[in-house]
Image (cartoon, rainbow, N blue to C red):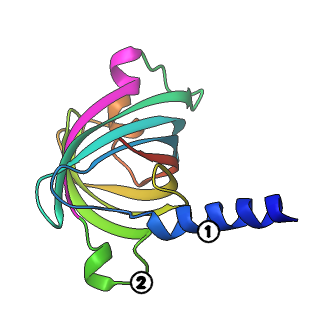
């Protein structure tokens, strides 16, 4: 019984000490599934805190399952972007383990925006979800396969880690 009490206490303390965004110098790594209309794939991202509520980073998506009607090569499936986030978790003050971050991204395929949320279960591990959408497409050429893969609303969901 003492061991069970100790384990429950340690787990509870780890939940209390978790914090979604710590500000300047904070580093996050996220990996998850990328879900969109024409393809599904994998998304990885890294964010670095510049200030109390500001972070910058990079994100990359690779489309694995592409619609059969699209003949996509590596260049069509791959996207790399620079991102800027406004981390609002401490502003809306729901829970210190929870962060909401709207942002902008400049990628190889488009200029867009995203809105995401993270929840940390412990100091190092949590889950995230992120919705991204194009604001300006580099090309309206509908014969280009890349137009269909990375220029639409997409949802990312997965695990997030404090570094």
Q: Position of residue 28 (x, y in %)?
A: 34, 46
- Determine the residue located farthest toward the left in the rendered image: 51
For marks 2 and 1, give the CA distance.
Answer: 18 Å
Mark 2 neighbour density, 10 Å: few (under 14) some (14–19) many (20 or more): few
- Determine the residue located farthest toward the top in the rendered image: 73
Query: Of 14 and 79, which appears nearest the observer?
Result: 14
Tell me the quarter of the image containing the N terminus: bottom right
The relative height of residue 86 versus residue 25 in the rendered view (above or below) is below
Q: Secondary structure at mark 2?
A: loop
Question: Tag on residue 115?
Answer: none
Tell me the quarter of the image containing the C terminus: top left
Is residue 2 toward the left or the right of residue 100 in the image?
right
- Determine the residue located farthest toward the right in the rendered image: 1
Q: Secondary structure at mark 1?
A: helix
Mark 1 neighbour density, 10 Å: few (under 14) some (14–19) many (20 or more): few
Q: Is residue 79 magenta?
A: yes
Question: Tag on residue 94?
Answer: 2
Say which residue label 1 marks.
12
The residue sitting at 44% across, 69% down in the picture is 97
Q: Position of residue 85 (x, y in %)?
A: 21, 58
The tag earlier along the polypeptide, 2 or 1, is 1
The residue sitting at 40% across, 36% down in the picture is 44
- Kindly report the secondary structure that dominates the magenta region of the rendered protein: strand
Image quadrant assignment for residue 80: top left
Q: Position of residue 25 (x, y in %)?
A: 18, 49
User: Can residue 84 be seen from the camera position used here?
Assistant: yes
- Please state which of the two labelled residues, at mark 2 or mark 1, is closer to the viewer: 1
User: Can residue 143 be seen from the camera position used here?
Assistant: no
Query: Of 88 and 3, which appears nearest the observer?
Result: 3
Q: Which residues are magenta?
A: 74-86
């Amino acid at each position: 019984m003492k061991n069970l009490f100790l384990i429950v206490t340690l787990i509870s303390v780890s939940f209390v000490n978790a914090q979604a965004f710590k500000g300047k110098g904070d580093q996050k790594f996220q990996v998850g599934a990328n879900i969109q209309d024409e393809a599904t794939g994998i998304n990885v991202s890294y964010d670095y805190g510049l200030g109390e509520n500001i972070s910058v980073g990079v994100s990359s998506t690779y489309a694995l399952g592409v619609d059969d009607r699209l003949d996509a090569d590596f260049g069509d499936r791959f996207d790399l972007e620079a991102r800027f986030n406004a981390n609002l978790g401490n502003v809306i003050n729901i829970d210190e383990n929870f962060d909401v971050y709207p942002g902008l991204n400049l990628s190889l395929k488009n200029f867009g925006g995203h809105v995401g949320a993270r929840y940390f279960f412990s100091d190092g591990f949590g889950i995230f979800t992120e919705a991204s959408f194009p604001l300006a497409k580099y090309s309206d050429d509908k014969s280009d396969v890349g137009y269909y893969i990375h220029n639409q609303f997409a949802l990312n969901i997965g695990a997030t880690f404090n570094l």
